Image (spheres, rainbow, N blue to C red):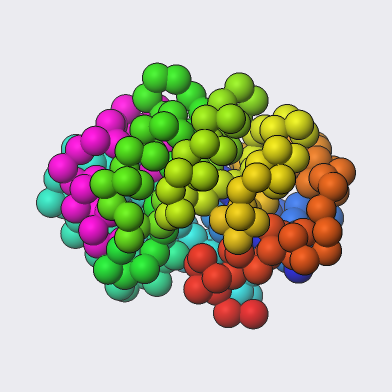
Amino acid sequence: MLIDTHVHWPMNDCPGPAELLDILDHLQIDRAIVLGWEILFKQGRMDQYNTLLAEFCEKSDGKLAPLATVHLYEKEDAMDEARRCIEELGMKGFKFHSWAQGESLFHPVMYELCEYCAEKEVPIMFHDGTPAYAMGSQMGVLARMFPQTKIILGHGGILHYWQEAMDVALQNSNIYIIMCGCHNWGMQRLCDNVNPRRLLFGTDILDGSSGPLAEYRCEQFKRLALDAATRNLISSESALKLYKWDM
C-alpha cells in the first residue's frame, strides 16, 4: 500500500473527488491525506472550507482523509472550529502554512491547539523549509514545548533545509517528516538517520495539473535504497498508525 500524506485540492467549484482519485490510481497511490488550498490564503470563511473538504473526502469511498486548517488570529473562534473539525467532522488533524497564512507558530492559540491535539491524539502538519517564517527549527521549539503533540514537517526542509529537518527529528521524538520536496540525497540521508516510523511519503499535489510533479515524487521514492520493511513503514504503515486510519 502507498499513502500520499501531502495532497492539496481546491474546493471552489469542485464537483467531487473523481479527478484526484484518477490521478492517484494512475500513480498507484491507494490513499491520500488531503489538505485545503483556498483556506490557506484566507479566501472565505474557515468553517466553509473545512466543511467542503470533509464532504469532498466523504465521497471517496474511504480513500481520502482530510486535515483541517484554522486561522489563529480568530482566537476562540479558531479553537471552536478546531473542535468542530475533529469532534463533528471527524477530520484527522490539522495543517498550517505559517508563511501563506501570515501567522506565527508562536501564538497563544497555537499553544492551546497543541494541548488539544495531544489530548485528542491527532497530529499537526506544518509547511516547512521556507525562511524566515516556516522553518523546521521553529517547529522543533514547538515540539519541545509540547512533547505530547505529534508535529509533522510537511516538506522535510524542501531543497536546502533537509539537514535542519533531520536534526530537529533526531532531537525530538514527536517530530515526523514527510519527504516531499527534498532532493534524492537529502531523502536518502533522512532514511539513513531518522527512525522510519516517523518518515512519511508525499507528493504535494496541488490540483489537476500536478500529475507530472507527483510522478517525479513517486520516482524519487522508488529510487531510495531501502529494505522492504523500511519501505513499507514509510509508504503506509507509519501513516496508518499516525492518523489512526483503519486498513
Left or right of 102, for residue 227: right
The quadrant of the picture occupied by the N terminus is bottom right
Q: Residue at x 83, y 64 (%)?
A: 228
Total labels: the figure holds 0
- Asked if residue 237 lies in the magenta stretch, the reply is no
The quadrant of the picture occupied by the C terminus is bottom right
Left or right of 75, for residue 99: right
Q: Residue at x 59, y 70 (%)?
A: 240
Residue 88: x percent and y percent? 31, 73
The residue most toward the bottom is: 247
| Residue 193 seen in the current view | yes
Left or right of 185, for residue 140: left
Residue 26: x percent and y percent? 83, 55
Q: Nearer the viewer, residue 91 or 133?
A: 133
User: Which SS type dominates the magenta stretch?
Assistant: helix
Q: Quadrant of residue 140?
A: top left
Q: Which residues are magenta?
A: 96-117
Left or right of 91, for residue 230: right
- Asked if residue 107 lies in the magenta stretch, the reply is yes
Residue 40 vertical placement versus 218 (above, below): above
Q: Residue at x 32, y 55 (%)?
A: 147
